[in-house]
Amino acid sequence: ASYLANHLRASAEKHGLSVQVNQIGSLMCPYFAENPVKCYADAKKSDTKQYAAYFNGMLKRGIYLAPSQFEAMFVSSVHTQNDLACTVQAAEETFAEMAERAGGVYARILHYRRRNGNERHADSGSSPRAR
């Protein structure tokens, strides 16, 4: 699950999308949110329209996810490394499509963050500067 969670974070960052991936053990849940999601109130602030675009993009690529932003996904012992690699590839394509559809808005936000030293780190989901 860490493999998948880390790749989701890195791919989202690459495409300028604000995605928080909460993961413990084989359980994970991506949230389209600027800040870490630590409680229900934080989760409610996430962008469910962005999640819907993610869900539909993944579905189009043969990856079946929970249709609600507020449901978790699990990696199980029947998932092979190939299954995970296909999921990572589908997420990469979906995030690229989402960023392109947004007309480059996300890329401009990412550029601004990097220029101002407020870049998110894929390993921690936090920025080096306090908000």
Image: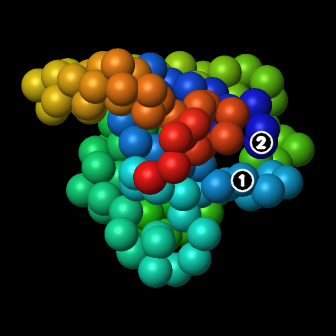
Q: Residue 107 carries which label?
A: none
SS at mark 2 in the image:
loop
Q: Callout 2: 10 Å neighbours few (<14), some, many (20+)?
A: some
**Above or below 23: residue 112:** above
Query: In this orientation, does residue 17 appear?
Result: yes
Q: What x and y, as percent, mark residue 81?
A: 79, 24
* Residues at marks 1 and 2 touching, judged by CB atoms closer than 8 Å: yes
Q: Nearer the viewer, residue 47 or 121?
A: 121
**Which residue is at a point 31% across and 61% down the rendered structure image?**
48
- Residue 3 location, quadrant: top right
Left or right, 110 with reference to 103: right
Q: Callout 1: 10 Å neighbours few (<14), some, many (20+)?
A: some
Mark 1 or 2, closer to the camera: 1
Q: Residue at the far left: name it.
A: 103
**Above or below 90: residue 49:** below
**Which residue is at a point 52% across and 41% down the rendered structure image?**
129
Q: What x and y, as percent, mark residue 50?
A: 29, 49
- Residue 80 location, quadrant: top right
Kind of residue at disc 2: Ala
Q: Which of 41 and 74 is in front in this view?
A: 41
What is the distance, in whole Å, between disc 1 and disc 2 at their CAs? Answer: 8 Å
SS at mark 1 in the image:
strand
Badge 1 or badge 2: first in the primary sequence: 2
Left or right, 37 with reference to 131: right
Q: What x and y, as percent, mark residue 85?
A: 66, 21
Name the quadrant of the N terminus: top right
| Residue hosting label 1 | 23
Q: What x and y, as percent, mark residue 71?
A: 54, 68
| Residue hosting label 2 | 1
Kind of residue at disc 1: Gln
